[in-house]
Amino acid sequence: MNRKIKRCKEDVIFDAILFVVLTVVMLVVAYPLYWVVISSISKPAAVSGGKVLWYPVGITFEGYLEVLRTNTVVRGFLNSVFYTVCGVLVNLTVTLPTAYALSRNRFGGKKIVTTFYMITMFFGGGLIPTYLVVKGLHMLNSVWALILPGCLSVYNMIVARTFFKSNISEELYEAAEIDGCTHAQFFFRIALPLSGAIIAILVLYYGVGHWNAYFSALVYISESEKYPLQLVLRNILITNQTALAQAATTPEAREAMRKQLELIDLMKYSLIIISSVPVLLLYPFIQRHFVKGVMVGSIKG
């Protein structure tokens, strides 16, 4: 027999207050995103005039059309996809074996190695020494300059190590060892198939990092054909506006400049939406692993 538990008045009031507070927080976070979406399809004059608040004004898709017509944007988008995919593969190839090795109790030097890794979280060589290393390895103006210097995140490695230590027990390895399983076979055939949650978390963390990165490309990449999308967006928003402002010397030129700046503003919002789409499409596929991977990797062990 199911009996309905009667809630006290204090619980109802607390839940109501919590619901209102969380709703307000959700609206505060969601409104800027919604505003960018409606601004990307509104007339630039309406956006700059502050008329776009709750719904688009003068719906136009000129910003998206101009983005698609700009070869540098399309090329930058494809470059970012390539850099992100290659970068994540290299990150996983380096991080997962390192984390697994440091999670095993039989690895005698794991404390020394872990300390060595953790020192790099507090001390770094700086921009100029890193640039000289990249230059000395002949990686300038190549995809490797964007991937190899940061191929291992110590924080992500520690989270993955904790996950392996908490979920892949020594008893499981001993049982596999009895059947003749080596460390490599155990890692690839048993540990990795059981680690879908942490792999999904690493893919998200590393993928978002590569997708949003632009400073490394700004330092190491000199050919515009190899620019990632974020660097292309930066050039559109900063370089083009500066050049237009300097070129406006007559009333006709200033009017043309004003219209061009409005178009650039429209492209800005369109590019924000376009650059966010890949991450938004990736998240639903790993959402079910996200909470499990983060919580297990952060509080256990």
Image: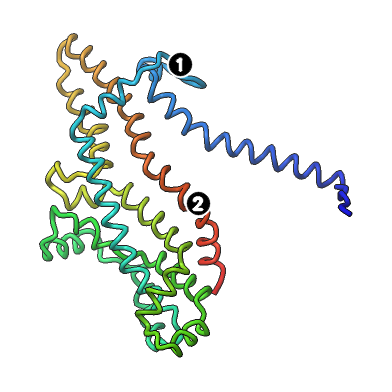
Q: Is residue 223 left or right of residue 274?
A: left
Mark 2 or mark 1, which has the lower sequence index? Answer: 1
Q: Position of residue 118 (x, y in %)?
A: 38, 72
Q: Residues within 10 Å of mark 1 (few under 14, many from 20)?
A: some
Q: Position of residue 77 (x, y in %)?
A: 26, 40
Is 252 drawn above or below residue 208 in the view shown? above
Q: Quadrant of the N terminus?
A: bottom right
Q: Quadrant of the C terminus?
A: bottom right
Residue type for callout 2:
Gln
Q: Quadrant of residue 277?
A: top left
Q: Position of residue 292 (x, y in %)?
A: 54, 61
Foreground residue among 115 and 226: 226
Query: Which residue is found at the position 54% from the left and 66% from the top?
Result: 296
Q: Secondary structure at mark 2?
A: helix
Q: Quadrant of residue 177?
A: bottom left
- Whole-angstrom CA distance, mark 2 to mark 1, is 36 Å
Residue bearing the label numbered 1: 51
